[in-house]
Image (spheres, grey):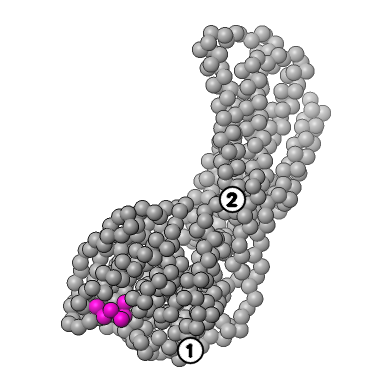
């Protein structure tokens, strides 16, 4: 018995080494290098005092709910306008990723309206926009419909209607501005300007570093990203930005964990320079996060003032005394592309692997049920029954472990997404979740080896499996084998931790 356990231990160790090597040999690597400090960003000038001039936002305003026809659906919005007479500058809010509710803009839309700017916030479309498919050109058309609506209002100055885009909106707004001269100015808040895939990969790496997550967690998630075939992730923002001729105000928070703000700024200035547009203002605001707030609370100091003073000062503020100014931004790593997964590790193959494993896990019980329904079930011989019971228990445990591993991976990724929003005190939970995932993977490996050994031993001792027992053995061992290979690809057996 001791010799048998020793043999099993050696076998499990050899399989573990083989699976661990898969994590190094097969997957594309992702290891973003540190970003070299750029002297231009280290020695930024202080933000001009005039841009931070206090804004008196106390004027009475009107509020009106509107519905604007668009492609495939009507878009619901809210217009807030100052009641003082005359024509005013106006601005359309363009949301970032997600459902894009207009309610998220209420506070700043109210502030701007009370300061003399007509604002329009609308709910993002639900037809033609989802997690997998995102047409930024279609979203740009929606924003231009809002511009047309504002241009028809008697209290709006048609020469000063602008677009404000945050995060994903930073890919939408330049497309709209390039398509229509009716757009008078552009405001970009936390705008990535690099491809969505590079932005997400950078944010993932940055947030995992802040969560003190093991490097294996990053490898798991980036390999999963490489298997995703969403076309919009490869969107190139540069062509549209080169065609932007309007004045541009770009604002970045220095504590934003979602945007590679240094490279985003480089991309913006490069594109505008190539397009011959020198009318841009870029400001870095200390303590600002992705939504220009401090830790998700109040707006960062100077944000609303800078935004309002710039809009109301147009066209005089279009050409600033200094293009780049504000707090020093520190970006630790480059925004690198995640290599596309090879054909054998794409999303389709992963889905097929999980489906085959699921079929293997239910094959045994289904086979028994069919045998019973057809009336061909026979009580196994005493020797078969005695040798089958320990094998049956092992197979049952393997099924539960495999299911547990799949559920734990899904739960772990969900936890990471939630903690990426609020990272305070999250790192112990991240380490615990990663430990559970890896322990289950190793447990599944040990169960596979011991189950194979038990089947071989049973056959040597005279067990003659029935057809349904053959199905159960092949299904569970084969399904678990597929999951082990998939786990190896995603680095669950790799070292270091």
Observer-nearest of 322 and 90: 90
79 sits left or right of 281 in the view: left
454 sits left or right of 353 in the view: right
Q: Residues within 10 Å of mark 1 (few under 14, many from 20)?
A: some
Q: Mark 2 or 1 closer to N-term?
A: 2
Q: Is any part of residue 41 visible from this angle?
A: yes
Q: Which residues are magenta?
A: 156-161
Instruction: Give the residue pinned by disc 2.
Output: 227
Q: Mark 2 or mark 1: which is in front?
A: 2
Q: Secondary structure at mark 2?
A: loop
Residue 215 image position (x, y, % from top left): 64, 57
Q: Is any part of residue 286 visible from this angle?
A: no
| Image quadrant containing the N terminus | top right
As measured in the structure, the alpha-carbon distance from the residue carrying label 2 to the one carrying label 1 is 43 Å
Q: Residue furthest bottom?
A: 321
Q: Residue furthest right?
A: 3
Examine the rendered structure and indicate whether residue 124 appears above or below residue 402. Answer: below
Residue 104 image position (x, y, % from top left): 34, 64
* Magenta region includes residue 351: no
Quarter assignment of residue 161 = bottom left
Quarter assignment of residue 180 = bottom left
Please, what is the dominant secondary structure of the magenta stretch?
A: strand
Observer-nearest of 52 and 140: 140
Examine the rendered structure and indicate whether residue 393 appears above or below residue 66. Answer: above
Examine the rendered structure and indicate whether residue 427 appears above or below residue 294. Answer: above
Q: Secondary structure at mark 1?
A: loop
Instruction: Give the residue pinned by disc 1.
Output: 322
Q: Residue at x 26, y 62 (%)?
A: 68
Q: Residue at x 31, y 71 (%)?
A: 147
494 sits left or right of 407 in the view: right
């Amino acid at each position: 018995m001791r010799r048998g356990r020793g043999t099993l231990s050696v076998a499990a160790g050899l399989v573990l080494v083989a699976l661990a090597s898969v994590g190094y040999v097969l997957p594309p690597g992702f290891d973003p290098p540190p970003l070299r400090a750029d002297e231009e960003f280290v020695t930024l000038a202080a933000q001009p005092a005039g841009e931070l001039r206090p804004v008196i936002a106390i004027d009475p305003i009107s509020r009106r709910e509107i519905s604007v026809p668009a492609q495939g659906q009507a878009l619901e919005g809210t217009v807030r306008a100052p009641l003082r007479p005359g024509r005013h500058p106006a601005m359309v809010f363009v949301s970032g990723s997600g459902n894009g509710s207009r309610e998220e803009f209420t506070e700043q839309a109210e502030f701007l309206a009370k300061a003399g700017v007509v604002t329009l916030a609308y709910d993002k479309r639900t037809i033609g926009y989802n997690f997998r498919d995102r047409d930024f050109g279609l979203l740009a058309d929606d924003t231009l419909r809002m511009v047309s609506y504002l241009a028809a209002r008697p209290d709006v100055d048609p020469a000063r209607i602008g677009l404000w885009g945050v995060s994903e909106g930073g890919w939408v707004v330049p497309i709209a501005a390039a398509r229509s001269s009716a757009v008078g100015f552009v405001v970009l808040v936390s705008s990535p300007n690099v491809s969505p895939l590079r932005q997400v990969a950078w944010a993932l790496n940055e947030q995992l570093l802040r969560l003190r997550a093991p490097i294996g967690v990053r490898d798991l998630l980036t390999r999963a990203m490489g298997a995703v075939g969403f076309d919009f992730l490869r969107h190139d923002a540069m062509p549209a930005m080169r065609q932007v001729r309007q004045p541009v105000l770009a604002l970045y928070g220095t504590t934003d964990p979602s945007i590679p703000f240094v490279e985003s700024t480089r991309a913006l200035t490069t594109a505008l320079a190539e397009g011959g547009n020198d009318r841009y203002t870029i400001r870095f605001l200390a303590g600002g996060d992705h939504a220009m707030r401090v830790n998700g609370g109040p707006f960062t100091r100077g944000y609303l003032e800078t935004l309002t003073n710039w809009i109301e000062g147009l066209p005089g503020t279009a050409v600033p005394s200094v293009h780049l100014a504000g707090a020093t931004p520190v970006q630790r790593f480059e925004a690198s592309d995640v290599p596309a997964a090879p054909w054998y590790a794409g999303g389709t193959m992963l889905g097929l692997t999980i489906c085959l494993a699921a079929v293997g896990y239910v094959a045994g019980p289904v086979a028994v049920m069919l045998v019973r329904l057809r009336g061909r079930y026979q009580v196994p011989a005493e020797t078969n029954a005695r040798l089958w019971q320990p094998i049956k228990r092992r197979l049952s445990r393997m099924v539960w472990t495999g299911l547990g591993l799949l559920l734990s991976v899904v739960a772990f990724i969900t936890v990471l997404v939630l903690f990426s929003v609020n990272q305070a005190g999250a790192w112990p939970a991240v380490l615990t979740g990663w430990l559970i995932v890896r322990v289950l993977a190793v447990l599944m490996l040990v169960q596979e080896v011991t189950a194979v050994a038990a089947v071989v031993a049973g056959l040597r001792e005279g067990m003659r499996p029935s057809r349904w027992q053959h199905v159960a053995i092949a299904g569970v061992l084969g399904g678990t084998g597929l999951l082990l290979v998939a786990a190896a690809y995603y680095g669950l057996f790799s070292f270091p931790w």
